[in-house]
Image (spheres, rainbow, N blue to C red):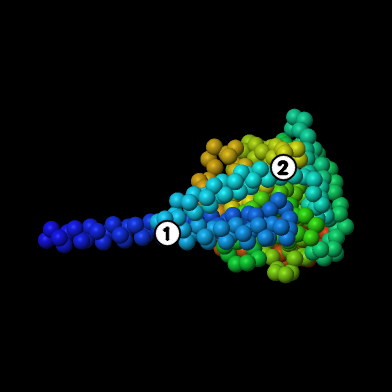
């Protein structure tokens, strides 16, 4: 019996040791993949040298993973690799965002604003004249908004790849006449496409596009066809006081971005969770949830928490807020913003 117990304990220790080694190897594999991608993407552009260094780093990681299972060389190989990884981290965290790059035309101009009492003047409001998604005449204007007339905040949810993923746009309404939309996006350079993977590696700066709804909404309903995008509008419920603070939080952020740029991040600094961050001005801000990360479920999450009109079902609310057919019919009508709201019958004032 005593011998059997010793054997069981010995086998248990061996199994635990092997499991620990496998766990270490998996951890090194994850660090290697991340590190190789960080080197490959580099500071905004990928070069032949970066590609070669990424390959070398990947091979070094593979050697270190093999060293995990070699008692004689484990400390030397794994320790050397971890030191190399620390050097990589120091370099990576010293990559700084910049506003001085060759930007694509649709994100070339940064908005900014001035505040004098209740009057907020926003500069570089985008209102492009579109012929197609990629053919347009850049047009910007400036406008002064009276905070005492801020009486609505709407959330637009734009879907193009199933129910889980959506782009979110917040729009502020002033006395039912003027609307200012804010789309938080990755700021892309000339010739650069969007990649969710690149978005984890400090490849894009963050931009707040302050825009006329005839730009950022009509672009998505009328001109983006590959894939087509479905746009839904939801009126957020809340007090005018919170709506005012929410708006001013955006104004503060666009001015900060102009002088102190920051990076976009696919997970932590994107179109949806930045809205949640700004909503900290609300003492009753919604709790953070996986539905904030999986943004397509955000509107239903707001509905469940009573932040949208609950006098009708969520499906009915979504149906009423479907913008595409009306927007396509209106084109560039001067009263575009007022008329796309006609199908939406839910009352209330707005706040996240």
What residue is drawn where x is 67% and y is 38%?
249
How many discs appear?
2
Instruction: Please identify the quadrant where the N terminus is shown.
Output: bottom left
Give SS at disc 2: loop
Verify CB contact (< 8 Å) between mark 2 and mark 1.
Answer: no
- Dividing the picture into quarters, in which one does residue 69 lie? bottom left
Distance CA(mark 2)–CA(mark 1)? 46 Å
Comparing 155 with 280, the one in front is: 280
Residue extending furthest toward the left: 1
Q: In the displayed structure, does residue 111 sit left or right of residue 201? A: right
Q: Which mark is residue 41?
A: none
| Residue carrying label 2 | 261
| Residue carrying label 1 | 70
Residue 150 is situated, as x and y percent measured from the top left of the image, at 70, 41
Visible residue check, residue 112: yes
Q: In the displayed structure, does residue 27 sit left or right of residue 169? A: left
Residue extending furthest toward the top: 117
Residue 153 sits above or below residue 7 on the image: above
Comparing 3 with 338, the one in front is: 3
Task: For label 1, count other residues whose C-alpha is less than 10 Å away and answer few (under 14), some (14-19) or many (20+).
Answer: few
- Dividing the picture into quarters, in which one does residue 283 lie? top right
């Amino acid at each position: 019996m005593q011998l059997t117990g010793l054997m069981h304990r010995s086998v248990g220790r061996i199994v635990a040791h092997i499991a620990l080694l496998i766990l270490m190897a998996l951890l090194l594999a994850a660090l290697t993949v991340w590190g190789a991608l960080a080197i490959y993407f580099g500071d905004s552009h990928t070069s032949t040298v970066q590609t070669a260094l990424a390959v070398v780093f990947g091979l070094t990681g593979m050697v270190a993973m093999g060293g995990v299972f070699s008692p004689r060389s484990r400390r030397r190989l794994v320790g050397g690799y971890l030191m190399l990884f620390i050097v990589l981290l120091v370099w990576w965290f010293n990559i700084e965002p910049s506003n001085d790059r060759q930007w694509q035309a649709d994100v070339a101009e940064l908005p900014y604003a001035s505040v004098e009492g209740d009057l907020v003047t926003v500069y570089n409001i985008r209102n492009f004249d579109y012929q197609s998604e990629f053919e347009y005449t850049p047009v910007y204007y400036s406008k002064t908004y009276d905070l005492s007339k801020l009486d609505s905040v709407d959330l637009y949810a734009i879907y193009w790849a199933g129910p889980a993923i959506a782009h979110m746009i917040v729009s502020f309404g002033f006395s039912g006449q003027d609307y200012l939309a804010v789309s938080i996006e990755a700021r892309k350079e000339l010739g650069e496409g969007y990649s969710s993977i690149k978005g984890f590696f400090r490849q894009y700066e963050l931009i707040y596009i302050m825009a006329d709804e005839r730009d950022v909404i009509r672009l998505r309903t009328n001109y983006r066809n590959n894939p087509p995008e479905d746009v839904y509008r939801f009126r957020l419920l809340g007090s005018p006081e919170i709506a005012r603070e929410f708006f001013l939080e955006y104004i503060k952020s666009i001015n900060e971005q102009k002088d102190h740029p920051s990076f976009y991040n696919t997970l932590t600094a994107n179109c949806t969770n930045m809205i949640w961050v700004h909503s900290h001005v609300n003492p009753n801000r919604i709790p953070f949830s996986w539905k904030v990360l999986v943004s397509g479920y955000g509107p239903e999450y707001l509905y469940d928490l009573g932040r949208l009109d609950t006098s009708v079902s969520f499906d009915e609310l979504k149906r009423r807020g479907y913008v595409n057919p009306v927007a396509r019919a209106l084109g560039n009508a001067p009263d575009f913003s007022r008329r796309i709201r006609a199908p939406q019958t839910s009352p209330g004032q707005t706040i996240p």
